[in-house]
Amino acid sequence: MSIDFRRSWMDEDLSLFRDNVVRFIETEMQPHDEAARKNGHVGHALWRKAGELGLLCTDIPEEYGGGGGDFRHEAVIHEEMAARALSGMSVGVHSIVAHYFLNHGTEDQKRHYLPRLARGEIVGAIAMTEPGAGSDLQGVRTRADKVEGGYALHGSKTFISNGFLAGVVLVVAKTDPTQGAKGTSILVVDTQDTPGFRVGRVLDKIGLKAQDTSELFFDDVRVPASAVLGGKEGQGFFQLMGDLPYERLIIGVSSLAAMEGAYRATLDYVRERKAFGKPVAEFQNTKFKLAEIATQIKVGRAFIDRCVEDLVAGSLDTATASMAKLWGSEAQGRVVDECLQLFGGYGYMNEYLVARMYTDARIQRIYGGTNEIMKEVISRAL
């Protein structure tokens, strides 16, 4: 009897949904992943195809064009992509943007943007990080100066996931630099035909090669007063903090799924690969390492599943979500490293899934707030 990693939150409808997700991934994503990694992005057509199949904004209410599901539907998508090291579509960031609109936007903003995000007509990005301000969002220097009819944006952002393909960007900026965090707002910027907006280079990362992570520049970009998310200045920091559990659980869910994907790929490999006349799987070291890995996944499944259930119930707190991100990303790094070792020299070759998983895993401890920040957040709840 093989070890079972069943999710406690799965049901029959979600199983059918997972089948649809896997079908999309295997027919539309995997065959083109190598090209996407060379190009640095997947292109707009894949996003539109995902939208046509109802695989975007699955937990956004139907009245706004979404799928009407809950976070479990999102988790299925994140899991199936992470288990195959398919990073080109940052569905997580896209969904986070949708939730900013849903949770904080005006009714006009919701009705204008959410259906388009759900259709894949536009790709969503959120621009927080700057060359001199990463996890410390109070250090943001991008300005939104008041001008007649709205604002003029000045500044630059970096490490922006979906930045190259983005049709709408939520920009974190200072609307009143004298007020610290209370002077921070999020402004909605449409990227098409917007004077002063420029996408810089698609950044050359060690991992996530298919994902369009870019620099963005705002040189006197004019936006109307109605572009402030929620319609009121100074709410940006509050809005950012309010959606952190959702964002950090996505990382936790993806980390665990990547561990499981690496485990299964390694199990298949060591059963076929021979050394000293017998399969590598028969050596005691291999069996013990895989036993340890399977145990970590099994234990992690209990915790992450509980977090998923709590988020669906509306009770997941920031500290626990930070634990999911912290534990998940740290465990992912250890597990994938152990799996790669069992591949020997082949584990260092990009043609093997485990090699791509290895380089992709490293960023998990950095984005969404570094793990050092996660420890700080958790410590405040002690």
Image: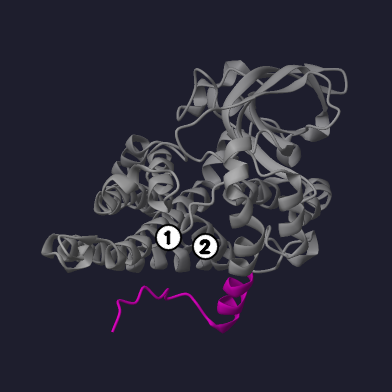
Where residue 34 appears, as percent x and y from the top left, is 57, 46
- At horizontal 52% and vertical 53% (from top left) the residue drawn is 246
Q: Nearer the viewer, residue 347 or 331?
A: 347
Amino acid type at image mark 1: Ala
Query: Is residue 237 inside the magenta stretch?
Result: no
Residue 257: give its label: 1
Disc 2 residue crowd, few under 14, some 14–19, many 20+, Cα 10 Å = some
Q: Secondary structure at mark 1?
A: helix
- At horizontal 38% and vertical 51% (from top left) the residue drawn is 354
Q: Is residue 97 left or right of residue 204?
A: right
Q: Is residue 230 above or below residue 255?
A: above
Q: Is residue 220 left or right of residue 215?
A: right
Q: Is residue 67 visible?
A: yes
- At horizontal 82% and vertical 52% (from top left) the residue drawn is 111
Query: In the rendered image, which quarter contains the N terminus?
Result: bottom left
Where residue 154 appears, as percent x and y from the top left, is 70, 16
Q: Pointers 2 and 1 in contact (CB under 8 A)?
A: yes
Query: Closer to the N terminus: mark 2 or mark 1?
Result: 2
Q: What range is drawn magenta here?
A: 1-20
- Place residue 61 in its image quadrant: bottom right
Where residue 288 appears, as percent x and y from the top left, is 15, 64
Q: Which residue is mark 2?
A: 80
